[in-house]
Image (cartoon, rainbow, N blue to C red):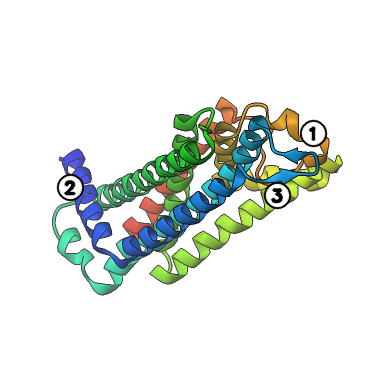
Amino acid sequence: MTARTVLTVAGLTLREAARRKVLRALAVLTLALLGLSAWGFAKLAGLESQAGALTSGEVRLVASQLLNLVMFGLSLIAALGTAFLAGPTLSGEVESGQALVLLARPVRRSAVLLGKWLGLATFGSAYVVLAGLAQFLVVRVTVDYWPAQPVVGLALLAGQTAVLLTLGLLLATAVSPMASGVVAVGLFGATWIAGVVGGVGAALGNEGVARVGTVSRMLLPTDGLWRGAMHAFQDPSAVLAAGAEFAGFPFLSEAGLTPAYLAWSLLWVALVLGLAGTVFARRDV
């Protein structure tokens, strides 16, 4: 019965998300980003350096880094979409009284919350996969480059979306829909900046500054998952070709994720989702 309830709520959440204006905004932003990236990558082959026209290897190397930049844009769009969907889906329904229709029945609140999480996670993952594949095709057609590990990279981006969604649901159990979205996106951006600062600290050999990035990635795994995705998207020779002068570059990842960090990310989602369920169960509706 609980599993059926979770799946039913997930389906309803997906249909509700598809009707919201946020979906149209995501589509417009994504199409704009894909169009701009297609124009930029098409111009890449004709660029020249001081030594003359770029070789095919140099074009692939530059395309690898630009792809990471564009994929960060897509991950930001996904973050905005999921964060601002999580609030209205939970907190908004509670404030408007719509949640009473469902919670008045003998249904566990934890099942409702899990169903909403599953529906939004499916929505966010589908967006990441479809938009990511579209971007890969753009790069393949324009500069004949294909990411080294596209499946791994997209899976990690979907995981990043799920992490931010989980945080958004936790915030939505305590604050208003708008506030939960703003705080979630703000923490997403702050964690990314902390990761950049940590990368610069590591490049300069400053352990104290480097620790900023390490701690931030443990507190909120979005940046850690993003760096793992970057490593999967970029050309395997990118780190060697970049050299020491590019150490700390925000769109270059020197190593993939460890199994321990992936396990921590899964545990983080489970802990935060459990906390959200506890808060939601005690909230007056």
| Residue under pointer 3 | 196
The location of residue 18, given as percent across then percent down, is: 25, 57
Q: In the image shown, does 248 or 264 lie closer to the viewer?
A: 248
Tell me which corner region of the image, top left, top right, bottom left or bottom right, holds residue 252.
top right
| Label 1 element class | loop
Residues packed near mark 1 inside 10 Å, few (<14), some (14 to 19) or many (20 plus): few
| Residue under pointer 2 | 8
Compared with residue 129, is residue 178 higher up or lower down, i.e. above or below? Answer: below
Label whose residue precedes the other's in the sequence (2 or 3): 2
The location of residue 80, given as percent across then percent down, is: 45, 60
Q: Is 263 situated left or right of 197 in this image?
A: left
Looking at the rendered structure, the kind of residue marked 3 is Val
Residue 218 disc label:
none
Q: Residue at x 13, y 57 (%)?
A: 105
- Check the image and name the residue furthest to the right: 205
In this rendering, the label closer to the viewer, 2 or 3 = 3
Rendered-image quadrant of the N terminus = top left
Label whose residue precedes the other's in the sequence (1 or 3): 3
| Label 3 element class | helix
Residue 243 disc label:
1
Looking at the rendered structure, the kind of residue marked 1 is Gly
Q: Residue at x 44, y 35 (%)?
A: 155
| Mark 2 and mark 3: Cα distance apart in space | 41 Å
| Mark 1 and mark 3: Cα distance apart in space | 18 Å
The location of residue 45, given as percent across then percent down, is: 60, 42
Q: Residue at x 40, y 43 (%)?
A: 134
The location of residue 40, given as percent across then percent down, is: 56, 51
Tell me which corner region of the image, top left, top right, bottom left or bottom right, holds residue 81.
bottom left
Q: Tags 2 and 3 in contact by the CB under 8 Å rule?
A: no
